[in-house]
Image (cartoon, rainbow, N blue to C red):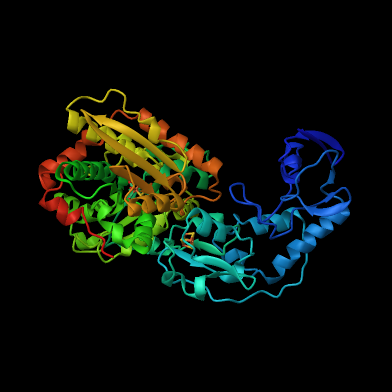
């Protein structure tokens, strides 16, 4: 431990602490723009400047030393902080009222905190990049903090962004759609301002709801419920599912269903696909195929390995294909009138829904994807008061789900759900303890071996594309020891998706994961093959997993 003096108070801190960490321990928060709890120290904004033994230093980078004297708010320090902030404010547009990050912007907050009341203003006017269906980049708003570049290059290993000639750019200055960007939206989560945001589409939703000819249905992704609470001023995970459903009915949805229904269905199809590959010598390891940022990644960086992907569409797209066929038929509704909206934690889902392969119902299977953040905005816009709402049930035929589907939202969940079903299908025995804890958690890579009546199946779980890349290099080298691998694009899985509430720090992701497993444990059914509406779907429509109808509607082939 080292003793330092912060604003006259002595504090003992670990030797590797920075001045910023020591000050926090002493009860003094030092505002900054480029620092982020999960990312490297950058020293790009210089707003965290403090006096260390009489000299101005950046608190984020300066390490503590014995007897150090730190002053965090002398007139000289405040003046230096303000001057550094004014350099950023000088070129930053002042269109806060029109910005998606209005009221959730670190630059706004910092300007208020430092009581900056006037500054010279010559804003940059650069062209917005709206080339992808998922995210929008507005370089005029960039503060050069460098967080997006770190996330894209170091965590996701995509390398679509770089700092060149003193500005953040796409590689070679191309529109984002022409780069290797996988549309994961992790850069939008890291951005302190509105320089990278989701492509907001709430007006398309409002138009659909106002159209009397349209029947507007929705599906909610597994990772949304725990996080949407954060958008409406509630604790993570504290909005219960049926009150959330009631809120969606307030927004005007005609029918409310759950992506969990098709997550259970995915397990039926994908589990059987795995067993078939194991039995018939198909391509192994089999890789999960539900995370669209991951699909974009394998298509871009490892196209020759596409045969490893499961042929299952994602639960979002299975739902889209079924709602305009099976459900429309059962309800006697013209599928042309159905407007299918999915509520997703993900920006890449917006792209997935527009893929030309995703029209097996004869229509665009999913018409509109709203992120958790956009739905939060709609709830606030429409003034939905959750404390006044009576819980409401999901609509039938595609609304039932099990705990196995709920855990899809956390890294390891698809694998655990698959194991719960595959074990019982292969062994014919009841799985007493459904908790495969070895595949849970936030670590980048997890692995387990499962004994299926004498057949040892080796599985692995990866979250983030940096981890996916390691797995793909092993497969490429022919050294992968696994039979089945779950890969999720975003750190922590979908609970950390690019469309989730901001901040989405590691601490927030851990809380959301906790909420997911609490919901799983509280449900009466926790194995996908026990879902009564999935059973009905097979009886009435699909007849068997991997059957003719399933191939037509639920499976696809991605080609290089
Ligand atoms: Fe996901 Fe999935 S779990 S990909 O993370 O397989 O987005 O939540 O909806 O489709 O079910 C996302 C979440 C989601 C799909 C499912
Ligand atoms: Fe990189 Fe993902 Fe952002 Fe694209 S969306 S620029 S891949 S972090």
Q: Classify residue 72 as left or right of residue 236.
A: right
Residue at x-position 46% and y-position 64%: 135
Q: Position of residue 468 (x, y in %)?
A: 40, 51
Residue 457, image quadrant = top left
User: Foreground residue, 13 or 237?
Assistant: 13
Residue 32, above or below 223: below
User: Foreground residue, 67 or 88?
Assistant: 67
Image quadrant holding the C terminus, namely: bottom left
Residue 222, image quadrant = top left
Residue 23, above or below 429: below
The residue furthest top is: 432
Residue 445, above or below 157: above
Whether residue 349 appears in this view of the structure is: no
Residue 369, above or below 434: below
Q: Position of residue 32 (x, y in %)?
A: 70, 53
Q: Position of residue 463 (x, y in %)?
A: 43, 46
Count of marks overlaid on the render: 0
Residue at x-position 23% and y-position 61%: 337
User: Foreground residue, 69 or 206?
Assistant: 69
Q: Position of residue 86 (x, y in %)?
A: 75, 65
Residue at x-position 37% and y-position 63%: 300
Q: Classify residue 389 as left or right of residue 401.
A: right
Image quadrant holding the N terminus, namely: top right
Whether residue 300 appears in this view of the structure is: yes
User: Foreground residue, 32 or 457?
Assistant: 457
């Amino acid at each position: 431990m080292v003793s330092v003096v912060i604003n006259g108070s002595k504090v003992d801190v670990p030797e590797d602490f920075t001045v910023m960490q020591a000050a926090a321990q002493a009860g003094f928060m030092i505002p900054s723009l480029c620092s982020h709890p999960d990312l490297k120290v950058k020293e790009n904004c210089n707003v965290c400047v403090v006096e260390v033994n009489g000299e101005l230093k950046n608190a984020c980078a300066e390490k503590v030393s014995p007897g150090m004297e730190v002053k965090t708010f002398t007139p000289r320090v405040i003046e230096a902080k303000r001057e550094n902030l004014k350099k950023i404010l000088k070129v930053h547009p002042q269109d806060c009222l029109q910005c998606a990050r209005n009221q959730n912007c670190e630059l706004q907050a910092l300007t208020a905190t430092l009581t900056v009341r006037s500054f010279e203003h010559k804003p940059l006017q650069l062209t917005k990049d709206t080339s992808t269906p998922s995210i929008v980049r507005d370089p005029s708003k960039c503060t050069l903090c460098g967080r997006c570049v770190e996330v894209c290059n170091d965590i996701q290993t995509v390398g679509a962004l770089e700092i060149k000639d003193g500005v953040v750019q796409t590689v070679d200055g191309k529109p984002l759609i022409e780069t290797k960007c996988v549309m994961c939206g992790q850069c939008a989560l890291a951005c302190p301002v509105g320089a990278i945001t989701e492509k907001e589409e709430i007006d398309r939703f409002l138009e659909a709801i106002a159209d009397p000819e349209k029947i507007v249905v929705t599906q909610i992704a597994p990772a949304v419920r725990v996080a949407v609470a954060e958008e409406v001023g509630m604790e993570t995970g504290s909005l219960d599912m049926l009150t959330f459903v009631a809120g969606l009915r307030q927004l005007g949805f005609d029918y409310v269903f759950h992506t969990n229904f098709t997550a259970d269905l995915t397990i039926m199809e994908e589990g059987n696909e795995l067993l078939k590959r194991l039995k018939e010598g198909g391509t192994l390891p089999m890789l999960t195929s539900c995370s669209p940022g991951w699909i974009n990644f394998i298509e871009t960086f490892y196209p020759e390995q596409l045969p490893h992907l499961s042929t299952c569409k994602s639960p979002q797209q299975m739902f889209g294909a079924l709602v305009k066929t099976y459900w429309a038929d059962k309800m006697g509704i013209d599928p042309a009138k159905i407007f299918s909206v999915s509520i997703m934690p993900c920006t890449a889902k917006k792209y997935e829904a527009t893929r030309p392969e995703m029209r097996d119902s004869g229509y665009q299977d999913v018409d509109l994807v709203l992120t958790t953040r956009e739905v939060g905005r709609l709830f606030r816009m429409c003034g939905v008061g959750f404390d006044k709402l009576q819980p409401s049930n999901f609509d039938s035929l595609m609304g039932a789900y099990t705990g196995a589907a709920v855990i899809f939202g956390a890294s390891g969940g698809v694998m655990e759900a698959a194991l719960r079903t595959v074990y019982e299908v292969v062994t014919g025995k009841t799985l007493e303890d459904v908790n495969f804890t070895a595949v849970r958690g936030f670590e980048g890579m997890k692995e387990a071996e499962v004994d299926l009546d004498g057949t040892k199946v080796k599985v692995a779980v990866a979250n983030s594309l940096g981890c996916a890349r390691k797995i793909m290099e092993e497969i490429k080298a022919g050294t992968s020891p696994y039979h089945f691998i779950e890969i999720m694009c975003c750190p922590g899985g979908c609970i950390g998706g690019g469309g989730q509430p901001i901040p989405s720090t590691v601490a927030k992701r851990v809380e959301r994961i906790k909420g997911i497993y609490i919901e799983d444990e509280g449900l009466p059914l926790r194995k996908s093959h026990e879902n009564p509406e999935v059973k009905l779907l097979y009886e009435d429509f699909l007849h068997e997993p991997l059957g003719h109808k399933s191939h037509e509607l639920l499976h696809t082939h991605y080609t290089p």
